[in-house]
Amino acid sequence: MDIVLGLRIKGGVLVATSKAATRGISVIKVGDDKTRELNPNTLMAYTGEAGDTVQFAEYIMANTRLYGIRHDIELSPSAVASFTRNQLAKALRSRKPYQVNVLIAGFDPKTEKPTLNLIDYLASNVELPYAAHGYAAYYTMSLLDRHWKEGMTQEEGVVLMRMCIKELQTRLPVDFKGVYVKVVDKDGIRDVSALVYPDEYPEAEVTEELEVQQGEIAA
């Protein structure tokens, strides 16, 4: 029942992951962060088999950081995505394939462009404006297809993320204990969960257009 969701906004990428770690119908842990910071401007979100996900994510994180130390330069998000895809492809042809699906969200300081890559356990790699793994894909892709637009501000992206989370809370039979939401932009990686939960934290400013869209969805 893992939820991994990402969408590209103007100057950055928003990524949401569910807090619950589950096994079957049981919630094993509340507050499980399914992301890893690969370098200052690249974030990996993952879902899949419990042991494979953490081991693979930390392997990619360690090698990405080692490259930065050795060469005194950080890999771009696209390069990280290519490396990740290559490692999954190699493992797929071995006796120990990884059952892992990931999103690579990043901001390239050289090109000043945000990127979001979807990579599945079969080592397919594609750059997308929005993407989802797990059960999130069943219920949120139609919302993202209708309401996502090029050049969305962070505030508009937050509102769209709220709409997706509300839909998941309505449709899914299991409580996924909320989500962690992080943004990757020129300033690095930050937790912006406070902006997505208006009942618990100060509400972010939203545009009139997105408020109207929220009303349409609620109706």
Image: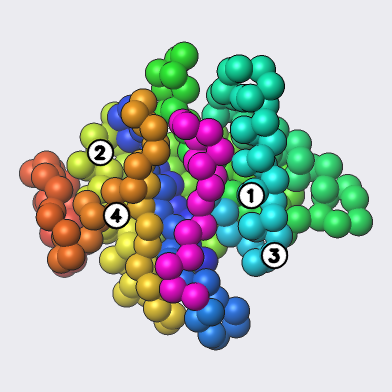
Label 4: few (<14), some (14–19) or many (≥20) C-alpha neighbours in 10 Å: some
Q: Amino acid at mark 1?
A: Ala
Name the quadrant of the C terminus.
bottom left
Quarter occupied by residue 178: bottom left
Q: Amino acid at mark 2?
A: Gln
Q: Secondary structure at mark 2?
A: helix
Label 2 – label 1 distance at C-alpha = 27 Å
Examine the rendered structure and indicate whether residue 138 appears above or below residue 158: below
Residue 91 painted magenta: no
Does label 2 or label 1 sit earlier along the sequence?
Answer: 1
Q: Nearer the viewer, mark 4 or mark 2?
A: 4
Q: Amino acid at mark 3?
A: Gly
Q: Residue at label 4?
A: 193
Left or right: where 139 falls relative to 127? left
Residue 124, x across and y down, in percent? 68, 42
Q: Nearer the viewer, mark 2 or mark 1?
A: 1
Does label 1 or label 4 sit earlier along the sequence?
Answer: 1
Q: Secondary structure at mark 4?
A: helix
Q: Residue at label 1?
A: 57
The total of numbered circles placed on residues is 4
Residue 30 painted magenta: yes
